[in-house]
Amino acid sequence: MLVELHTHLYGGLALEDLEWLAARNEPRWPIFIESYRRAYNSEPNISGLFEGTAESRQRLAATYYFLRPGNFAAFQCAFDLVIALSRTDPEELLEITRRVVGRQESAYAEYRMLLSPRETHESFREKLIALCQGLELASKITGRDARLAMSLPRDPATGRELYRVLRECQAAKRIVQDRLVAIDFCAIEEGYRPRDKASLFDEIISDNRKRPEQALAILYHVGESFEDKSLESAARWVVEAARLGAHRLGHCVALGVPPEFYLGTTRRELACERLDQIDFELREAAQLARAGYDIDRAALEKEAQELSATDPGRSIDVHYDSARIGRARAFQDWAMQAVRETGAIIESCPSSNLRIAGLGSPDWHPLARFLEAELPTVIGADDPGILATGLEAELEMVAGWRGVGREQVARMKARALECTSPALTGRQ
Ligand SMILES: [Zn+2]
């Protein structure tokens, strides 16, 4: 039995769904055009994209599908095409859930959905209910189980506000109680430290204890895109999210990407992030040393003192020479064990990481290292529409990877059954 635990509802649209949206709503082109400029520093050709001819469909496919290694901005551009076309009104949500669940390969799937942070409480409530109705109806028609993992904005204040609306709605509506099984945090990760969610995570965990029959799992995209920090800091973010109580962690590329991927490169890190890393290494020094990652306490304290005297928003260079690569690997090895101790599940999304995280080759993908470190891992298709993939295709692909193989794929498929949100929160 197949179980899909990492997929986004609007990342699962097919070309005909885009055409349906475009026929229904006047596209909000500025959203896509600005995103395209940010990603590619040039102008997109949008004229006649929805004429319905073979030529225009080919161009739509070329604009929409994200098939080659790139970066998060380039992926966001493809997603912004979807956003430009959609209105997420209740009628649209019902139709989109029907279409996406209609293509669902797995017997059970949890769909993530991020609404605009500008929704009013009223419209958020209305759309949440429509999503749950759509998933319930589509489940009945297809005989497949489709559940909702509502994505909340990463900004802690807005996230908390909408979380409370979500809970009110859950208490008031049976359909929300049934379909809503998790809370997710996704989209741009840079600038949103996991630790700033500590009190929100505590609130969710405490609410789960009070009402176990309505418990919501915490799903957290982390270590996927980390352009503003060192590899080690990004791996630390994964540890922090796991220790805060996230049930499942999305991607975690930084935790296990072979550090040689960065050999000879110079990354930039904010001074405030470096200070956080120094503080962390000083606190965890004994544990880190046991794992073969020794720190020079006096040197770190001196560096912290110097950094504290400068602008925290300043960027510093981090050069990855072979000595730094060796240390980064030791830090990751420790971090993987630290995550393992929390019991958090890793959701690995192979095609997504090869392309959105720009890894390019399976040799750079962290999956084999996750399995070697015995981290509980499941596979997700992430955005099967944009990435033109599916869960079965992803599982088939990694079965052929060095360090993975069919036996591990069978194990990951079996594990997914035990790692649904209701199973992890004890709702079942
Ligand atoms: Zn995702």
Image: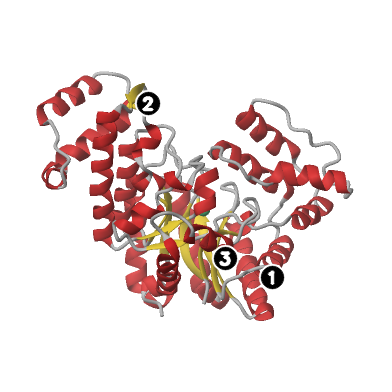
Instruction: Indicate which disc, 2 or 1, sits on the residue closer to the N terminus.
Output: 1
Give the camera-side residue of 391 and 17: 391
Looking at the rendered structure, the kind of residue marked 3 is Glu
Residue shown at 49% from the left, 58% from the top: 400
Image x and y of residue 66, in percent: 63, 45
Give the camera-side residue of 33 and 28: 33
Q: CA distance from mark 2 to mark 1?
A: 47 Å
Could you tell whether 397 is left or right of 314 in the image?
Answer: right
Q: Secondary structure at mark 3?
A: helix
Would the CB of label 2 be found within 8 Å of ligand 1? no
Give the camera-side residue of 421 and 380: 380
Image x and y of residue 232, in percent: 30, 38
Looking at the rendered structure, the kind of residue marked 1 is Gly
Looking at the rendered structure, the kind of residue marked 2 is Gly
Mark 3 surroundings: few (<14), some (14-19) or many (≥20) residues within 10 A: some
Q: Secondary structure at mark 2?
A: loop
Give the camera-side residue of 66 and 11: 66
Q: CA distance from mark 3 to mark 2?
A: 36 Å
Instruction: Indicate which disc, 3 or 2, sits on the residue closer to the N terminus.
Output: 2
Residue 392 is tagged as: 3
Q: Secondary structure at mark 1?
A: helix
> Is residue 109 in sight in this rendering?
yes
Q: Which residue is mark 1?
A: 102
Mark 1 surroundings: few (<14), some (14-19) or many (≥20) residues within 10 A: some
Image x and y of residue 99, in percent: 71, 66
Residue shown at 24% from the left, 54% from the top: 337
Quadrant location of the C terminus in the rendered image: bottom left
Q: Which residue is mark 2?
A: 264
Image x and y of residue 394, in percent: 54, 59
Mark 2 surroundings: few (<14), some (14-19) or many (≥20) residues within 10 A: few
Could you tell whether 29 is left or right of 384 in the image?
Answer: right
Comparing labels 1 and 3, the label whose residue is closer to the camera: 3
